[in-house]
């Protein structure tokens, strides 16, 4: 990535590759990593609610888990994403555990987070857990703790 700017989805800090044809490649912690977005899709997403953006981010995380390194957001993909349902609490908790596993290769290893607004780790947690606010992530952590104890 060569230049900094704002994530077309969330408006948070992101890095960009030089624009190619009608799409950009963006690396955004709030969107969970790298993605390609067409000019048309970029214009559409700017008017989306946080709930729709959360569905899009969950789709991006899922695509990466399925092996797509840089998912491509097109206007057709956005039409499909609008039809998705929000993740269940159980799915969100599972994704929290997957994120923690990604951050540590050992059980019992402490993973620390910066609780300031739009800290990179918080943005990644929001992306992975399908959350709009950090308070939701804290609730998911408590949910996981209760389930394990």
Image: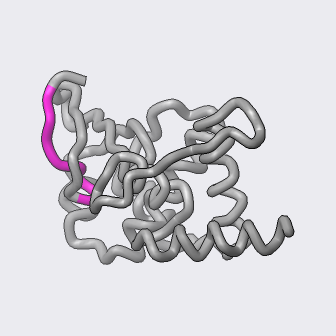
Identity of the residue drawn at 52% across and 65% down: 130
Percent x, y of residue 22: 20, 37
124 sits to left or right of 108? left
Identity of the residue drawn at 49% across and 55% down: 125
> Colour scheme of this structure image?
one colour
Q: Quadrant of the N terminus?
A: top left
* Vertical side of 57 occupied by 89: above or below: below
> Number of marks in the image?
0
Percent x, y of residue 37: 30, 44
Q: What is the quadrant of residue 41 in the picture?
A: bottom left
94 sits to left or right of 65? right
* Vertical side of 117 occupied by 4: above or below: above
64 sits to left or right of 107? left
Q: Is residue 16 magenta?
A: no
Residue 85 shows in this picture: no
68 sits to left or right of 74? right
Percent x, y of residue 89: 67, 75
Percent x, y of residue 15: 23, 34
* Vertical side of 115 occupied by 4: above or below: above
Numbered range of the magenta stretch: 3-10
Q: Is residue 5 magenta?
A: yes
Identity of the residue drawn at 34% across and 56% down: 75
Q: Quadrant of the C terminus?
A: bottom right
Give the camera-side residue of 51 and 131.
131
Residue 4 shows in this picture: yes
């Amino acid at each position: 990535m060569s230049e900094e700017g704002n994530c077309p989805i969330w408006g948070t800090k992101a890095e960009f590759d030089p624009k190619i044809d009608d799409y950009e490649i963006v690396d955004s912690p709030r969107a969970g990593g790298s993605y390609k977005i067409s000019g048309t899709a970029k214009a559409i997403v700017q008017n989306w609610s946080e709930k729709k953006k959360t569905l899009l981010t969950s789709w991006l995380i899922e695509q990466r888990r399925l092996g797509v390194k840089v998912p491509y957001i097109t206007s057709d993909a956005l039409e499909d994403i609008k039809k998705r349902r929000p993740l269940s609490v159980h799915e969100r908790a599972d994704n929290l555990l997957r994120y923690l596993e990604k951050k540590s290769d050992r059980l019992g290893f402490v993973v620390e987070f910066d609780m300031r607004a739009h800290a990179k780790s918080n943005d990644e947690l929001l992306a992975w857990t399908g959350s709009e606010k950090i308070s939701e992530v804290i609730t998911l952590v408590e949910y996981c703790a209760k389930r394990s104890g």
